[in-house]
Amino acid sequence: MRQLLDDGHTSLVASVRRDALNNALAAARAPIWEQTSDHDQFTAFGDFHDFMEWHGYYGEQRYDGFEARYNLMEHRYLCNPVTKGERSALTPVLQAVRQVYNQVLGPIWAAIDRTLTGSYIMQFAWYWSDQQTIVKRNDEGRAVIRYCLNPRDWFFDPAWNLYPDWLVLAAIDTYQQVLGTAPTPGWEGCRDVALAAGPWWPLSGVGVMMQRPTVLRLTDDGLLHGIDEPAVVWPDGSTLWARDGAIVPTG
């Protein structure tokens, strides 16, 4: 990944993944908001932005230094608020996706992250080319998902940025199946890749795609662990050896 970027292949994660999924989610939500009464719109608007403010999700907008506070009427999220029906339908789906990540994918990248520390090689394929993790006000997918998940589930790196956006894909699928709305077609390619592969990153002129592991051995605490056998095995035969969550040399 590092070599590809050094060779001039710029990251297209924002334009290929993030924008396509945000647009699809916005299109899937639009009919619900259009059919909502004025009273329910007003209620949803207040509930949504109160939640985003008081749970710290407006962190990049709340203060200018230590004294001045931004006017949230001018700096609200640009997406529509979330209605009660949306939240009821999305909450269990998103919680299930997060549980799968914690059990299947999280332990692998937690071990790799501890080993690579400051030189984390996946850093260059973050959503934003400037590598910032500040939430953009037009990032509808993240705003909606944060509101529907546990208040303290920030869901930043690596799950959101490095994986094929399972939470947004699950949300779009839920709108389509449960709430009867249709997304734009741009999400279908992202969905196909997510169903067939692991983490993937589109770059200019080339794409990077990883397979999902076929074997994953964990301790009761969810740490990668194998004594006389690898903790992770991929379909191509690649392995990762670890004990109590720490990567060790092969064998």
Image: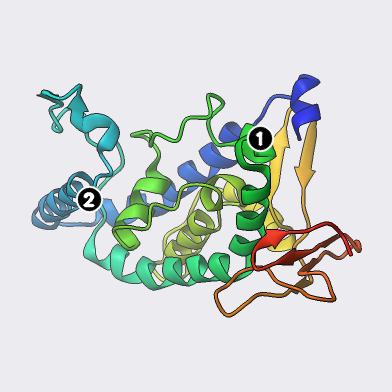
Q: Is residue 60 above or below residue 25?
A: above
Residues 171 and 236: in front is: 236
- Residue at 83%, 64% (x, y): give it: 234
Q: Position of residue 89 (x, y in %)?
A: 35, 70
Q: Which residue is mark 2?
A: 55
Q: Position of residue 100 (x, y in %)?
A: 56, 70
The way the protein has been coloured in the rendering is: rainbow
- Residue at 15%, 26% (x, y): give it: 70
Compute the Cα span from label 1 to label 2: 31 Å
Helix, strand or loop for disc 2? loop
Q: Is residue 181 above or below residue 13?
A: below
Left or right: 124, with 24 as reference point: right
Q: Quadrant of the C terminus?
A: bottom right
Q: Which mark is residue 119?
A: 1
Q: Which mark is residue 107?
A: none
- Residue at 79%, 63% (x, y): give it: 241
Q: Is residue 146 above or below residue 103?
A: above
**Which corner quadrant of the image does residue 220 belong to?**
bottom right
Amino acid under disc 1: Ser
Disc nearest the viewer among 1 and 2: 1
Q: Position of residue 178 (x, y in %)?
A: 42, 71
Contact (Cβ within 8 Å) of mark 1 with mark 2: no
Residues 80 and 158: in front is: 158
Q: Earlier in the sequence, mark 1 or mark 2?
A: 2
Left or right: 208, with 28 as reference point: right
Left or right: 166, with 193 as reference point: left
